[in-house]
């Protein structure tokens, strides 16, 4: 589809999707460096893909390969990272929301 045939809303949507696709990985790495986000986990994507394919009753080995499926089956989430807000609340108890 050419740009002349697209409305302004469609063009803005395509630009937003493209920007998100290209900016998310470097932004996530930057946030991980300053400890605002956990380090990117390459196996986590395969875990979601394997679960999705199994929910559709499809064989994930055919799509991802036996090695990726084995890594996904053995994967456990990283529980050592604590969200920044939780760290901030534990350091400054007065900032924690009170339950009335």
Image (cartoon, rainbow, N blue to C red):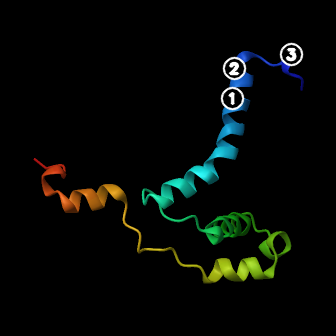
| Of callouts 2 and 3, the N-terminal one | 3
Secondary element type, mark 3:
helix
Instruction: Give the label on residue 4, or none.
Output: 3
Secondary element type, mark 1:
helix
Q: Which residue occupies the extreme right position in the image?
A: 1
Task: Say whether residue 95 is left or right of residue 34.
Answer: left
Q: Nearer the viewer, residue 15 or 26?
A: 26
- The residue under label 2 is 9
Q: Residue at x 64, y 45 (%)?
A: 23
Task: Say whether residue 12 is left or right of residue 75.
Answer: right
Q: Nearer the viewer, residue 36 or 100?
A: 36
- Residue 79: percent from left, percent from top: 43, 74
Assess disc 2: are there few (<14), some (14-19) or many (≥20) residues with their C-alpha within 10 Å of its C-alpha.
few
Q: Which residue occupies the extreme left position in the image?
A: 100
Q: Nearer the viewer, residue 89 or 56?
A: 89
Quadrant placement of the N terminus: top right
Q: How far is the residue under mark 2 from the one under mark 3? A: 13 Å
């Amino acid at each position: 589809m050419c740009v002349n045939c697209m409305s302004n809303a469609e063009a803005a949507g395509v630009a937003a999707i493209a920007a998100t696709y290209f900016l998310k990985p470097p932004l996530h790495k930057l946030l991980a460096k300053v400890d605002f986000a956990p380090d990117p986990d390459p196996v986590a994507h395969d875990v979601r893909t394997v679960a999705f394919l199994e929910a559709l009753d499809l064989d994930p080995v055919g799509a991802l390969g036996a090695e990726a499926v084995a890594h996904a089956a053995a994967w456990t989430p990283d529980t050592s990272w604590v969200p920044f807000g939780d760290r901030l609340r534990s350091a400054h108890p007065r900032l924690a929301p009170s339950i009335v």
